[in-house]
């Protein structure tokens, strides 16, 4: 992509989204950052501007709300158009229960964020790319989109849907010159597990004990690799794992 084109990153206030924003700012990309936590969003934007001199636009809204999403994207200043890249990063796991004991509010939160939120944002941005005949959509999936593990049920289902939607987008966008990619990380040490366990920090930290997990920067570098390929190259699907992980629940915890 050309550096005068902006990159829109959803869920940019923490984890993979924040790490990607930091790396792409260093690399010279103008950024449009979205998130629900206004203070964190604005602090990140100011830090990136002062550290790199890059232009940063912030949009505070919840991707689960279609009307909010549409209004926010319509408010993007002309100076941040065209949008060359959409990184659908906003996502979460909530709860870890067998299906018959699942909390319906957890289910709704995951479906509305991981699936419907991705669709709401893409529906707003993709027509702009189609009109220009170029663009790149990167969907952040998970190892849970390729495998299913005990008590992962609805979370795994949403990430399988992301994998399927990525393929569908690739097919639909092919004739319009738009690249579509999926990045599926294994264990990444972010706030992911703390969110899954509803703020139980001690339980969340046990997930990463005994091995070296990925960090947000590792995944951000994979995303940058995808974006930096020449126009005739599309990385369709990238699975990135810690060296100590071979499957969703298979770890070498001696490292």
Image: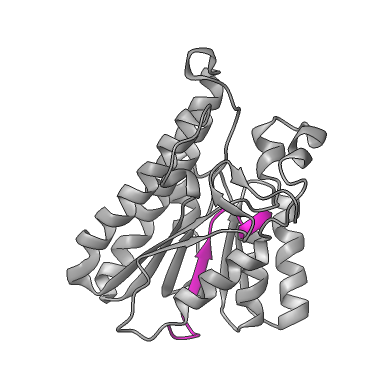
Q: Nearer the viewer, residue 135 or 71?
A: 135
Rendered image coloring scheme: one colour
Is residue 164 shown in magenta? Answer: no
Q: Decide if residue 117 is in sight here.
A: no
User: Residue 173: x and y, percent?
Assistant: 24, 64
Viewed as shown, does residue 87 lie left or right of 58?
A: left
| Quadrant in which the C terminus appears | bottom right
Give the magenta-colored segment's residue range.
Answer: 1-16
Q: Residue at x 63, y 46 (%)?
A: 36
Viewed as shown, does residue 6 lie left or right of 251?
A: left
Q: Which of 65 and 216 is in front in this view?
A: 216
Is residue 13 shown in magenta? Answer: yes
User: Residue 179: x and y, percent?
Assistant: 32, 70
User: Residue 248: x and y, percent?
Assistant: 53, 44
Q: Residue at x 77, y 61 (%)?
A: 43
Q: Which of 8 and 150 is in front in this view?
A: 150
Q: Decide if residue 72 is in sight here.
A: yes
Main secondary-structure element of the magenta-colored stretch: loop
Viewed as shown, does residue 143 lie left or right of 254?
A: left
Classify 87 as above or below 248.
below
Classify 150 as above or below 180.
above
Q: Residue at x 74, y 54 (%)?
A: 40
Classify 168 as above or below 6.
above
User: Residue 208: x and y, percent?
Assistant: 73, 46
Q: Which residue is drawn at 65% across and 80% down?
A: 54
Q: Determine the image quadrant of residue 241.
A: bottom right
| Residue that extends furthest to the right in the rendered view of this protein | 202
């Amino acid at each position: 992509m050309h550096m005068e084109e902006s990159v829109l990153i959803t869920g940019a206030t923490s984890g993979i989204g924040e790490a990607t924003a930091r790396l792409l700012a260093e690399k010279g990309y103008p950024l449009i950052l979205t998130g629900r936590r206004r203070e964190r969003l604005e602090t990140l934007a100011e830090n990136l501007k002062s550290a790199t001199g890059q232009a940063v636009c912030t949009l505070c809204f919840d991707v689960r709300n279609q009307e909010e999403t549409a209004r926010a994207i319509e408010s993007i200043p002309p100076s941040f158009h065209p949008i060359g890249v959409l990184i659908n990063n906003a996502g979460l796991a909530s709860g870890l229960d067998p299906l018959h004991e699942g909390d319906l509010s957890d289910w709704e939160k995951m479906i509305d964020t991981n699936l419907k939120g991705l669709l709401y944002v893409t529906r707003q941005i993709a027509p702009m790319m189609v009109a220009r005949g170029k663009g790149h959509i990167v969907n952040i999936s998970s190892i849970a989109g390729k495998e299913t593990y005990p008590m992962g049920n609805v979370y795994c289902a949403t990430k399988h849907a992301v994998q399927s939607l990525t393929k569908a987008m690739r097919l639909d966008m092919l004739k319009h010159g738009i690249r579509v990619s999926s990045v599926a990380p294994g264990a990444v040490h972010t706030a992911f597990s703390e969110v899954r366990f509803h703020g139980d920090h001690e339980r969340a930290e046990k997930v990463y004990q005994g091995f070296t997990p990925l960090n947000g920067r590792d995944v951000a570098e994979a995303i940058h690799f995808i974006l930096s390929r020449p126009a005739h190259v599309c990385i369709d699907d990238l699975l990135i794992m810690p060296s100590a992980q071979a499957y969703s629940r298979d770890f070498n915890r001696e490292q």
